[in-house]
Image (cartoon, grey):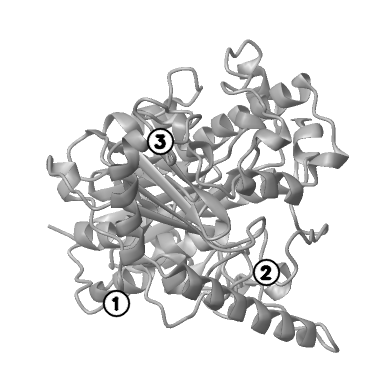
Amino acid sequence: MPAPNILIFMVDQLNGTLFPDGPVDWLHVPHLRQLAARSTRFANAYTASPLCAPGRAAFMSGQLPSQTGVYDNAAEFASSIPTYAHHLRRAGYQTCLSGKMHFVGPDQLHGFEERLTTDIYPPDFGWTPDYRKPGERIDWWYHNMGSVTGAGVAEITNQLEYDDEVAYHARARIYDYARGADARPWCMTVSFTHPHDPYVARRKYWDLYEDCAHLNPQVPAFDYDQHDPHAQRIFDANDWRNYTLSDDMVRRARRAYFANISYLDDKIGEILQVLRDTRQEDNTIILFVSDHGDMLGERGLWYKMCFFEGSARVPMMISAPQMQPGLVTVPVSNIDVCPTLCHLAGVSMTEVMPWTSGESLVPLGQGGTRQSPVAMEYAAEASYSPLICLRQGAWKYTNCALDPEQLFNLETDPHELENLAENPAHAATLEQFRIMAAQRWDLERFDAEVRQSQARRWVVYEALRKGGHFPWDYQPLQKASERYMRNHMDLNVLEESKRFPRGE
């Protein structure tokens, strides 16, 4: 049997609470619903870090930010860290990326043999937070509340233009794979930027949610002084005092967000249709996942940057012959993706497993269980010192050297409204989590390593902005002289080789 192809759909900022067992029934997402029906569905999947770059580096490598050094959106992803693209390519796969991945540094491939698009928000060291200046807000790249106040309808935006292009190139490349010029199996990652804010959607998708019963958050906004210290820091980072949010703005933002999920569903459906049309579906593993979530106004919070469910929980679905369709409720993580893909493809990661935190999800898709907790880290904007989190069973534990501990029972308190850390009845549970956290993290050392990284990057960034500037942006090259028909080609050979299927 030939090695399976692998198609990965990664979306950006998709709230995992909307996928308790595949997509909730009120979302207009027929293609994702069909994929869910044939997939192992993970109800409690989490990001490794609720921000783009650290979450994505962890997803690709199977390592937490404290291992990769990708603490924030401006931290370099070292080219020496193996990713699933490296492992699969080493084993004989074609590896390809269409879309966003938020790589920082001169290596803009990280194991991908080729990228079909440039990135949409390629950062350099200029987006580096600075723990030496707690409370500093860097206006030109920090989030503000303008995405909420400006929510609405548009037929084209920066992000719509990008994701249209991502889907186009993905479809074209799947046609190329079918033509068989390269006999190797393939792994394609299609990485969209939606439904990440701004909350702006095309009218055809906006209209789907005119009568949606879910436009108001389930948990109303708290007063600022009712929030925990980290949530307050997020509010400050988002410049909340300079914006007044009306109930209508909140509803419009959520409506556009839901609309953009439907837009993504259409794009994913187009790609899956090409997979079917080219007779490759039966030999292709499909993974659907997000890098992190979006609070969507719950508790008054927006975007990500915290460990509350809306921000940290992500959808994850895997359609593979080795895994049974059905629901898995055991907590899992994005860092499990890399070892899972290698397991499914029959590729060994033995050499680097001692330094890999992720675990294969294949046994869970075969009825197995596991006891290890899910670990999360956050050391980026809106933090003044690293935060860590553990999810195990019904429990979620959060700690930061600057803040009171948090302990939530998600079975009895799914909205995380009752912090049980100071409740004597749960002292034994709290102590168990403290022990597990101490075995995994030295918070003082973690803080020192983040500060060192930030200080170094600020020096380098300021130096590189003087004089000539050479960007790290990926520049996709098209060999125009090798496209379509050219005079050095045999027309008969060309037309035959570009036809699929042949002989029908």
Left or right: residue 51 compared with residue 255: left
Q: Residue at x 57, y 76 (%)?
A: 76
Q: Is residue 427 above or below residue 492?
A: above
Numbered label attached to residue 423:
3
| Helix, strand or loop status at disc 2 | loop
Q: Residues within 10 Å of mark 3 (few under 14, many from 20)?
A: few
Asked if residue 294 shows in the view, the reply is yes
Mark 3 or 1 closer to N-term?
A: 1
Residue occupying the far front of the picture: 424
Three-letter amino acid code at the position of disc 1: Arg
Mark toward the start of the polypeptide (3 vs 2): 2
How far across and how far down the image is residue 36, in percent? 33, 32
Residue that label 1 marks: 90
Mark number for residue 294? none
Amino acid type, label 2: Tyr
The residue mark sitting in front, 1 or 2, is 2
Q: Secondary structure at mark 1?
A: helix
Percent x, y for residue 146? Answer: 80, 40
Q: Residue 131 got which mark?
A: 2
Left or right: where 430 falls relative to 403: left
Residue type marked 3: Asn
